[in-house]
Image (cartoon, rainbow, N blue to C red):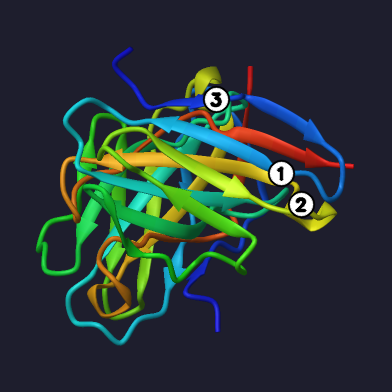
Amino acid sequence: GAGVSQTPSNKVTEKGKYVELRCDPISGHTALYWYRQSLGQGPEFLIYFQGTGAADDSGLPNDRFFAVRPEGSVSTLKIQRTERGDSAVYLCASSAGRTGELFFGEGSRLTVL
Amino acid sequence: AQKITQTQPGMFVQEKEAVTLDCTYDTSDQSYGLFWYKQPSSGEMIFLIYQGSYDEQNATEGRYSLNFQKARKSANLVISASQLGDSAMYFCAMREPSQGAQKLVFGQGTRLTINP
């Protein structure tokens, strides 16, 4: 497709489980971002990739969160030992450059029971 | 301190009327960018309009315009001739080079409802 694709759209898991969320950016976009949006809030920055490397991971809340982008295209956000407070919509965005317009996907809604 | 403040949790407007969504920001950078995004119930964030801090003219994109008042640090979104499809959450966001030009900081949003 032409836009940013995120899977799964919905994920329900139990506390303590491991979760992976996938993002397929717009073809050719070198920059990829993950944001987290809690209920009633605006999105909060998690991590930014330029190519394959995480150029800025200052928004990751703790070491249970990790993200990879091994070939500079698809990215996976990984959450270990999930907690109820991790429940949120995880948004992925891509852009043609570091300061270009961000194009967002529809998000992955994570619910931790 | 909040970087982006949107003081209107919800707005209700009659179809075809104009509506102004408020946004104030806080930065010590001289160069920065301001954005408005629309988030319909599908969840996707849709870019609407951008204003650079050095832009002398207020940004316009179709029915959207940005009322940029630099001295007041405000960047209000104006939607003219509102339509039922404008009902959505609206987020103001800022990019500050000193905080990492790749980051957008978002406000808490305003839920706009257009009544027929």
Mark 2 belongs to chain: A
* Numbered disc 1: secondary structure: loop
The numbered dot on residue B71 is none
Q: Residue at x 62, y 69 (%)?
A: A62
Q: Nearer the viewer, mark 3 or mark 2?
A: 2
The type of residue carrying mark 1 is Tyr
Q: Amino acid at mark 2?
A: Thr
Q: Residues within 10 Å of mark 1 (few under 14, many from 20)?
A: few
Question: How far, Cα to Cα, is label 1 from label 2?
Answer: 6 Å
Q: Chain of mark 3?
A: A
Classify mark 3: helix, strand or loop: strand
Residue A29 in view: yes
Q: Are marks 3 and 2 in contact (CB under 8 Å)?
A: no
Does mark 2 fall on the same chain as mark 1?
Answer: yes
Residue in the image at 49% along x and 21% along y: B83
Q: Which residue is mark 1?
A: A18
Q: Residue at x 58, y 23 (%)?
A: B42
Front-most of residues B17 and B94:
B94
Q: Which residue is mark 3?
A: A7
In front: label 1 or label 2: 1
Does A29 appear above or below A66? above
Residue that mark 2 sits on: A82
* Circles 1 and 2 in contact, beta carbons < 8 Å: yes
A47 left or right of B65 in image: right
Q: Position of residue B17 (x, y in %)?
A: 49, 31
Q: Earlier in the sequence, mark 1 or mark 3?
A: 3
Q: Secondary structure under badge 2?
A: loop
Q: Nearer the viewer, mark 1 or mark 3?
A: 1
